[in-house]
Structure formats: structure tokens, C-alpha cells
Amino acid sequence: MSNTKAQPRRVMLKLSGEALMGNLQYGIDPVFIGRIAEEIAELNALKVQVAIVIGGGNIFRGAYLAEGGMDRITGDHIGMLATVINALSLQDSLERIGVYSRVMSALKINEVCEDYIRRKAVRHLEKGRVVVFASGTGNPFFTTDTAASLRAVEIGADVMLKATKVDGVYDKDPQKFPDAKQIKRITYDEVIQKKLAVMDTTAIVMCRDHNLPLKVFNMNTPGEMVRAVTTDEVGSLVVSGE
Ligand code: GTP
């Protein structure tokens, strides 16, 4: 294979809830989640340890409903529960194709999944299990992007993979501006200064302060997740300036 690179040992994959909707307006598209599971299975077969943080926006958007008058903290709690639904669905899709996985929640709901315990999560990964982290950070006001950066740093991930609907980081919104240009490599500080919509600032700062490289890639292109991990050909890389 051309342009291959040293394979990371452990990755954190950040999936938005919307990624599970596929072509639907709401909820989970079984075909789409099945494809995501197949790609995760490919990474698992390559012996890459895969941890995942998943959002809940396909089911519930706390910030949006807060604008309509709902108490923000209640909204965020409902949003966290939505991520549990998505995590269990992804676990089911993974296990249907023979990939062992564990769901660990920042909120205690022992009847449906394990609590998040860092050392246990690392042990699961070392045993080749995919670990899906649910309930974000367990706190209101923090996004699931921030949860992904936090968990990635906690478990010692080598890279954060941010799945999006576009090919990487652009100088302006490529869905609005046809002349938007993709930036292949950029620093965390430039992303913050230029207010590029990669992840929220808290999440980017967490990556920057812990020197966690961030790869942004297109989840809608089949096979892109594996290529983003095994080659330098696709996506955009956010790194420190040095
Ligand atoms: P090791 O034996 O340490 O390799 O890990 P394991 O996850 O296989 O063992 P454990 O006995 O912890 O878990 C067995 C099964 O029970 C797994 O499917 C876990 O996900 C599940 N499990 C473990 N703890 C909990 C919990 O608190 N709540 C729920 N709902 N399931 C749990």
C-alpha cells in the first residue's frame, strides 16, 4: 500500500449521534450503523485498540431545547441518556459481527451497562474489546467532543479520530461555500484563532494541552475510517505548532 504509516496502538473515535442517522431524519439507520460497525471491526482486526465516544444529537439536542425554554441541565441529562441508547445500539451492531465490546457510562446505570472506571476501560482495550463511552463526561454543559478529548487523554490514546460529514478541516464551511479549501495540516491554536468548526474550544484545548493529534475525516465515505488510521492520504490533521 502506498503512503502507509506507523499504525497507532490505541485510537479514540468520536462519532456524532447524527452519524448514526444515515439518510433518516431521526434515530438510527440500521444500514448505516452496520457499516460503521464493519469499519470498526476492520480496525479491531488490524489490532488497533478502539475506544469510542458517541453523541446523542440524532435523538435529543439539549442546547436546542434550552433555547425553547427547557432547563439546560435537564436537557443535558436527557442528552446524556440519548448517548446511552446510541452506545448500546453500536454495541449490538458490533457484537452481531463478532466484535467484543463494552459500554461504560459516566452516569451510573448498572442495569444496562458498566460504570466508567478508567483502569477497567484500559484493561478491556488491552484485551481487544472495543470500549464505547456513554453519557459524555457525566456533567451538563460539556459536549461529547469534550468527553472524547477527556477520555482519550485518560486512556492514553495515540490519536483522536473525529468523524464528520466533510473530508476534513476547511478554511470556510464547505457545505455553504463551493470554493472552500481543505487544509491538510493545521495547529490547534490556528483552529481556535480562526474559529474553524472542528470541535468546541474546550475539546480542542484539551487535545492541545496534552499533545493529542486530532484527525478529522469523512464518515460518509465508505472505508475512510480505516484509511484515516492507516495512511496519511485522507482527512486533515490538527497538531501542535512545533
Ligand atoms: P474480565 O473478566 O475482567 O476480562 O472482563 P469482563 O468484562 O468480561 O468481566 P465482567 O465480569 O466484569 O463482565 C462480564 C459481563 O458483564 C460483560 O458483558 C460486562 O459488560 C458486564 N458487566 C460488567 N459490569 C457490569 C455492570 O455494572 N452493569 C452491567 N449492566 N453489566 C456489567
Image (spheres, rainbow, N blue to C red):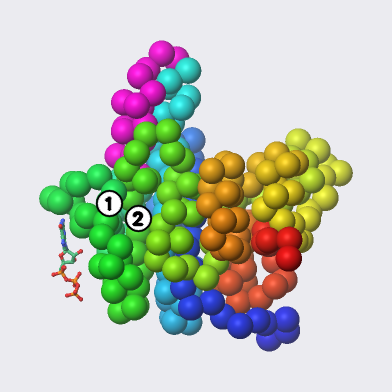
Query: Which stretch did the figure color magenta?
Result: 68-83
For image coordinates 59% across by 45% down, the residue present is 199
Residue 67, placed above or below residue 107: above
Q: From the viewer's perspective, is 197 left or right of 79?
A: right
76 within the magenta span = yes
Q: Secondary structure at mark 2?
A: strand
Seen from the viewer's position, the closer of residues 103 and 204 is 204
Label annotation for residue 105: 1
> What whole-number distance in Å separates the C-alpha atoms at marks 2 and 1?
6 Å
Picture disc at residue 133: 2
Q: Name the amino acid type tagged 1.
A: Ser
Q: Is residue 107 left or right of residue 49?
A: left
Question: Cβ–Cβ below 8 Å for labels 2 and 1?
Answer: yes
* Front residue of this view, candidates 39 and 47: 47
Look at 36% across and 46% down and name the residue there.
137
Q: Residue at x 40, y 61 (%)?
A: 154
